[in-house]
Image (tube, helix red, strand yellow):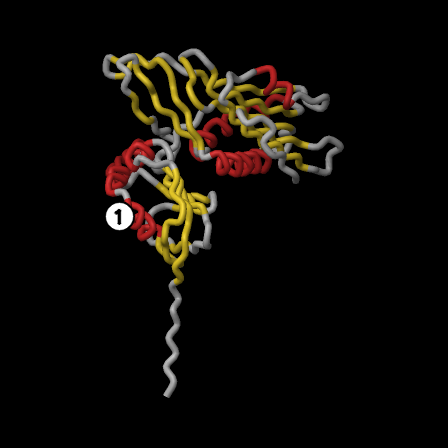
Amino acid sequence: MNACQDENPMDSLCHVSCQMDQSEERKDVFKLSRDWLSVQEVVDAVNSPTCGAVSLFIGTTREDQVDGRKVIGLEYEAYELMAQSEFRKLCGDLRARWPSVTHVCIHHRLGWVEVGQASVVMAISSPHRHDGQQAIQHAVTQLKATLPVWKKEVYDTKDSSWKQNVECPWSSHSQLAALSEREMSN
Amino acid sequence: MCVLLFNTELKLFVCVLYFAKSVELTGVKEEQAVAVTTPISSRDLWGLLVQRHPRLSLLQDQVVLAVRQQYVAIGDQSVTLGDGDEVAVVPPLSGG
């Protein structure tokens, strides 16, 4: 396996090529970008003549209302070095569960993301659609549970609050859920 | 008579990174040369950081650490640190 160094100071790129015993090298491509994301670029990264399916997920910034305040955008930050290693673990998990998965590409935003813009684009290619569709659902959940990335909601009132994914084991929601589960079983 | 004393606790320096809410609570993103001992329980390591930045206690129960880019829950778990290791304060994740 070999990893590329940063090619662009704006982006953090991890490009890992895995030599499997198939004729084609399988790719896991991860990019953190301060610039807007290109869905086409992510799709192109996983396209392959051996694949009949590209499964795609685009996470976009939603205009939520929270306590009468409107979300105008999200501010993202990441532990970049660890995001790359967690991405590699995520891919390892996907490939163990769905060995037919060919290429995986995730691009994630950093910095300011306005409402309506894409925060994350994920694509997985596979020979047939079933494995790719299953894998991408799992990948979204795992990303939310394990990738060291944080987002802050910014409101039209100019204040902001850090969000917590329910998938994250140490979030307050996660602990409330565990607590009520224990109470119900008593 | 010879008495042998084994000092099994080493003192060394690590780099601590702060993210998201913990940056707002401490006012810093990175600290070099933070003195720690090894081995150390993750609870004691957290306690050491709270001692440096008391407002970090607001994250109590909603935080883990990362040591050499591996998540470590706050608890009795023993952590071995090396000189120059990277430790991070990790509030609840919200990627995606």
Question: Considering the image in quadrants, where does the N terminus of chain A appear?
Answer: top right
Say which residue appears at 41% left-offset and 53% top-offset. Answer: B13
Circle 1 crowding by C-alpha within 10 Å: few under 14, some 14–19, many from 20: few
Q: Nearer the viewer, residue B32 or A19?
A: B32
Q: Nearer the viewer, residue B69 or B82?
A: B82
| Residue B7 in picture, x, y percent from top left | 38, 69
Instruction: Say left or right for A143 vs A41.
Output: left
- Kindly give the residue lying farthest to the right in the view shown: A23
Question: Considering the image in quadrants, where does the C terminus of chain A appear?
Answer: top left
Residue A25 position (above or below residue B71): above
Q: Is residue A111 visible?
A: yes
Label 1: chain? B
Residue A125 position (above or below residue A26): above
Quarter occupied by residue A71: top left
Say which residue appears at 30% left-offset and 50% top-offset. Answer: B48
| Residue B83 in picture, x, y percent from top left | 46, 54
Q: Amino acid at mark 1?
A: Gln
Q: Which residue is mark 1?
A: B51
The local secondary structure at tag 1 comes to helix
| Residue B18 in picture, x, y percent from top left | 37, 38
Q: Is residue A186 visible?
A: no
- Kindly give the residue lying farthest to the front in the view shown: B33
Q: Nearer the viewer, residue B31 or B5?
A: B31
Say which residue appears at 28% left-offset and 38% top-offset. Answer: B59
Quarter occupied by residue B56: top left
Residue A116 position (above or below residue B88): above
Quarter occupied by residue A3: top right
